[in-house]
Image (cartoon, rainbow, N blue to C red):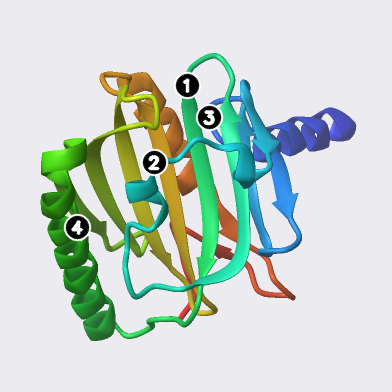
Amino acid sequence: MRFFYVAAMTAMVLFCAVPAKASVPYYNRDLGYTIWLAKGWKEVSPSILDQAEFLDGIVSGMDSAGRSAGYVLEDREAHLTVTELHGRVVSKTAINNFNRYVVRQVSRHAKDGCAKRSVCLRRANFDKAKNMLRMELDAHDSDGRPITSVIYIVYTSQCMIKCVGTVLRGDEDGLRDIDATVSSLYFDRGLRQETVGALLY
């Protein structure tokens, strides 16, 4: 009876700890994070992902630390890249100011590119619980197909992370899959663990 109780409790803990959608954890040693990838996602070299020139350098003045990772959702044309940015922003005031700066830069960049590439910022919002800025844009890929791009700036106590996801325009399920994947990312450098949903400061 005792064995059955322990087994049942263990199963309950495991069930609660794993994301609702069947996922597998992938650890990225270079960037120091683990990400849960649902069925259909796989890790690829970010260099093979097709990103429009506009999306590749979307936030001017934000230098990459040179480390990045790429993921694709095989059953639909959904891509996700994760890149570490130089520097960090910690205080709430600094984060708010930086968010305004990023949105202004993206809006200005989008307006400059709208005539040529029909790039438009649809919405931007900051999730305080996750310390994450999310921007959604309409754009076109290198083949001229309409796509929706979602750009996330994730603030942690150690660094800032930029995630860029792209799906064919109108693929709402793909957008939800990208949102869920980015939200599952957590940092485990050293002994500290930081989830996007509960960052340590």
Dot 2 lies on which element?
A: loop
Return the residue nearer the eye: 117 or 152.
117
Dot 1 lies on which element?
A: loop
Q: Nearer the viewer, mark 1 or mark 4?
A: 4
Query: In the shown orientation, is residue 130 left or right of residue 48?
Result: left
> What residue is shown with label 3?
20
Query: In the shown orientation, is residue 9 left or right of residue 170?
Result: right
Task: Give the spatial CA distance, label 1 vs label 3.
Answer: 23 Å
Query: In the shown orientation, is residue 81 left or right of residue 89?
Result: right
Q: Which mark is residue 52?
A: 2
* Number of dots carrying numbers: 4
Q: Residue at x 56, y 35 (%)?
A: 19
Q: Position of residue 158 (x, y in %)?
A: 54, 79
Q: Residue at x 81, y 37 (%)?
A: 6
Q: Quadrant of residue 3?
A: top right
Q: Earlier in the sequence, mark 1 or mark 4?
A: 1
Query: Contact (CB < 8 A) between labels 1 and 3?
Result: no
Badge 4 amino acid: His
Q: Position of residue 201 (x, y in %)?
A: 46, 81
Residue 48 seen in the figure: yes
- Screen quadrant of the N terminus: top right
> What residue is shown with label 4?
109
Q: Earlier in the sequence, mark 3 or mark 2?
A: 3
Dot 4 lies on which element?
A: helix
Query: In the shown orientation, is residue 101 left or right of residue 81?
Result: left
Q: Earlier in the sequence, mark 1 or mark 2?
A: 2
Q: Nearer the viewer, mark 1 or mark 3?
A: 1
Q: Residues within 10 Å of mark 2 (few under 14, many from 20)?
A: some
> What residue is shown with label 1?
77
Dot 3 lies on which element?
A: loop
